[in-house]
Image (tube, grey):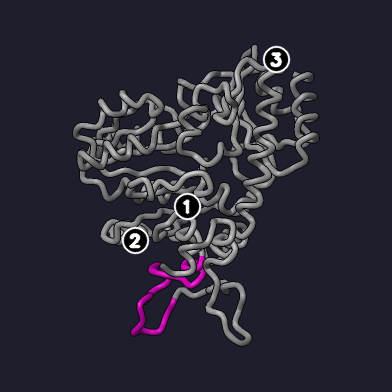
Amino acid sequence: MSPKETLRPETLAISSGRPAPGPDALLNPPIALNSTFHAGGEVGYGRYGNETWTALEEAIGALESGPTLVFSSGMAAISAVFSILPVGAVVTASNQGYSGVMTLLGNLHTSGKIEARFVDVSNTEEVLAALPGTALLWLESPTNPTLTVADLPRLIAAAKAQGSGVAVDNTFATPLIQQPLLMGADIVVHSVTKYLAGHSDVVMGSLSSRDPALLARLEDARKIGGAIAGPFEAWLALRGLRTFPLRFERAQANAMEIASRLSSHPKVAEVFYPGLPGDRQHERAASFMKGFGAVLSFTLHSDGVHADRVCESSSVITYATSLGGIESLWERRRRWAGESMTVPESLVRLSVGCENVEDLWEDIVQSLEKA
């Protein structure tokens, strides 16, 4: 066992992806701005490899316990996975998850390139019933935006037992909470844009896998598809990753406090956050997750118009679509046409950041009162 394999995530985030030590050696990897390389080496061309990518891939791989590839966006990484499936392959996926994935799967289904089966991933029996004939089980847990939790250990084991591939979008949970590769998943997906980079200044994605043959196919998809990350963006993401555990710890603590307070606010109908003991997802999440994340959602005793007004009334929380940054963001999810119809009209998704929790709460209260 190498020394790296015994280190904990907080240390790995800081120490991985560094240049080799030595007298006057660089502490940080450089921004490698090269499209062309001298012949005779392993890279060959700028679309095939980059020194700065490699450093970021090493760091994410250390956290996810598997070799990693970075892509130009989370959707580019996801598209690479679907691109290697044979025509007509069955993909079983959540009926409520990231809208970009649902839209892409819907388009691929309509065109006949794949068969998409949409299920409630929190209903284990429903997922198991859909597994026969499935080429790829696509799991997102907790789901976006209602934070439902899939029984990952059981579903991954069941899928693998019948020969199905398994990919898990780990963006919400992050490797600090769960490591799907160690549960037996074939692929772990990240929108690096979110918690890993964490500063709302990078668009990037990643895929991790412990299967060398599968990883080689995904790397070929990146080479031929051209969805490569820029070296400057990779450098920024790696810089952000250094503080990822610190940011996530603070944001998660804030989320727990905000969720608890929202659950007793008279204008709030329901709070979706698996960290709450009364949440319908709590028991399952607590059985295998190491935390509950920093995203929560809530619905109001009113309609979508009032929910929009709440989001428009904030002064500390930013009204925007994204999550995982150091700043808090919120929005009404059904304002987007691609959002699942299972999501309530008044649902507000709140990505809790690292601000002072009392400032966040005061801003939430005044926004609810204004609306």
> Which residue appears at 19% of the width and 34% of the height?
133
Which badge, 3 or 2, comes first in the chain's sequence? 2
Residue 1 visible in the shown view: yes
Examine the image and state in which quarter residue 202 appears: bottom right
Q: Does 276 sit above or below residue 327?
A: above
Residue 233 visible in the shown view: no
Q: Which residue is mark 3?
A: 267
* 310 relative position to 91: left or right: right
What amino acid is found at the position of numbered circle 2 in the picture? Glu
- Cα distance between the residues tagged 1 and 3: 37 Å
Dot 2: what SS? Answer: helix
Q: Which residue is mark 1?
A: 205
> Which residue appears at 68% of the width and 42% of the height?
353
Examine the image and state in which quarter residue 160 appears: top left
What amino acid is found at the position of numbered circle 3 in the picture? Lys
Which of the pair 162/333 is nearer the observer? 162
Q: Which residues are magenta?
A: 36-55
Dot 1: what SS? Answer: strand
* 253 relative position to 9: left or right: right
Q: Residues within 10 Å of mark 3 (few under 14, many from 20)?
A: some
In the image, residue 6 lies at what x, y percent?
48, 62
What amino acid is found at the position of numbered circle 1 in the picture? Gly
Frontmost of labels 3 and 2 is 3
Frontmost of labels 1 and 3 is 3
Q: Does 345 sit above or below residue 255?
A: above
Q: Does 264 sit above or below residue 356?
A: above
> Which residue, as the protein is rendered here, is positioned at the far bottom?
23
Q: Residues within 10 Å of mark 1 (few under 14, many from 20)?
A: many
Q: Which residue is mark 2?
A: 219
Which of the pair 81/176 is nearer the observer? 176
Dot 3: what SS? Answer: loop
